[in-house]
């Protein structure tokens, strides 16, 4: 019998392996079964919100047939588009059982992770992404950390505890600190955990020139597709074709 080639073993190159997980993309999230370390930057919006809410309707087809996310006008509408979201109205009609069961499933999805074209909210914080190398931590950014409601709530709660204890909160430019956000489980069992690292440092030290490098608006940086209701409708017509009864919908004022 021929001798099998034995596998060779190499030393783990953690730095190289970990840097593959980081990317040059502006928007980052926390992948399943990983921990991301970030420094939350102070808010740039006058709301003072460390996490900015963004609401989209997903899975709508553009002219090329590619999936697009359209901004929800109820949240992002402006003077030009108004704040009456056509897609929210379609969702509402489906929820109120004014469509056939098949149509309802198309619009609202099958449940679980499939929510059809229902409004989906994400929460974005401007952060520095920390990568731990053998030479110490390296910070990149600013980036936009995208989290679901539960996870952004955990971050805010951690800051509230700091505030209650009269300590500098994580976003403080002088005495703030990095936080670890860990994600475990998948689907509905997804859980996020937020831990303060205790690595207190001034932004000037870890990221010189941070003020000049910060994004002046989180919402602008997201480049949302804020389209008027009639254009939203065109997207829906392309997406669902004759699977929806458009005549009936028009009678409902859609
Ligand atoms: Zn909407």
Image: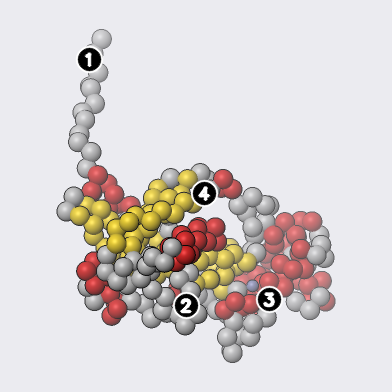
Question: Mark 1 falls on what kind of element?
Answer: loop
> What residue did someone put label 2 on?
48
Determine whether 27 is above or below 36 in the image. below
Of the pair 248 and 49, the residue shown nearer to us:
49
Q: Earlier in the sequence, mark 3 or mark 4?
A: 3
Q: Can you give x and y, in whole percent of width and height, for residue 91 in the image?
A: 71, 67
Distance (Cα) linking label 3 and label 2: 30 Å
> Is residue 212 left or right of 168 when viewed as pictured?
left
Q: Quadrant of residue 240?
A: bottom right
User: Where residue 106 sits: x, y (%)?
Assistant: 70, 59
Residue 3 drawn at (x, y percent): 22, 15
Nearer to us in this view, 97 or 3 = 97
Query: From the viewer's perspective, is 208 left or right of 156?
Result: left
Q: Earlier in the sequence, mark 1 or mark 3?
A: 1
Residue in view at x 64 percent, y 82 percent: 83
| Residue, far top | 1
Categorize mark 4 by other alpha carbons within 10 Å: few (<14), some (14-19), many (20+). Answer: some
Real-space Cα separation, disc 3 to disc 4, in angstroms = 33 Å
Q: Which residue is mark 4?
A: 191
Q: Earlier in the sequence, mark 3 or mark 2?
A: 2
Question: Which residue in the structure is indicated by mark 1?
Answer: 3
Answer left or right for 121 relative to 30: right
Residue 86 marker: 3
Sort mark 2 into few (<14), some (14-19) or many (20+) by Cα contacts within 10 Å: few
Q: CA distance from mark 1 to mark 4?
A: 47 Å
């Amino acid at each position: 019998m021929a001798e099998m080639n034995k596998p060779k073993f190499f030393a783990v190159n953690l730095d190289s392996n970990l840097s593959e997980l980081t990317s040059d993309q502006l928007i980052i999230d926390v992948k399943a079964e990983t921990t991301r370390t970030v420094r939350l930057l102070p808010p740039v919006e006058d709301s003072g919100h460390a996490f900015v809410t963004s609401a989209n309707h997903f899975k709508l087809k553009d002219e090329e047939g590619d999936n697009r996310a359209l901004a929800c006008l109820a949240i992002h509408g402006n003077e030009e588009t108004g704040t009456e979201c056509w897609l929210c109205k379609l969702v509402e009609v489906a929820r109120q059982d004014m469509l056939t069961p098949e149509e309802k499933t198309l619009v609202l999805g099958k449940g679980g992770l499939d929510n059809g074209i229902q409004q989906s909210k994400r929460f974005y914080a401007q952060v520095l992404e920390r990568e731990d190398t053998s030479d110490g931590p390296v910070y990149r950014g600013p980036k936009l950390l995208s989290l679901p409601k539960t996870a952004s709530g955990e971050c805010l709660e951690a800051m509230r505890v700091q505030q209650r204890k009269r300590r500098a909160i994580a976003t403080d430019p002088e005495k703030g600190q990095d936080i670890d956000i860990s994600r475990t489980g998948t689907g509905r069992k997804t859980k996020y955990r937020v831990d303060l690292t205790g690595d207190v440092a001034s932004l000037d030290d870890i990221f010189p020139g941070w003020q000049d490098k910060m994004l002046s608006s989180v919402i602008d940086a997201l480049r949302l597709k804020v389209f008027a209701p009639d254009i939203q409708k065109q997207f829906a017509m392309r997406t669902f074709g004759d699977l929806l009864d458009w005549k009936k919908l028009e009678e409902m004022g859609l």
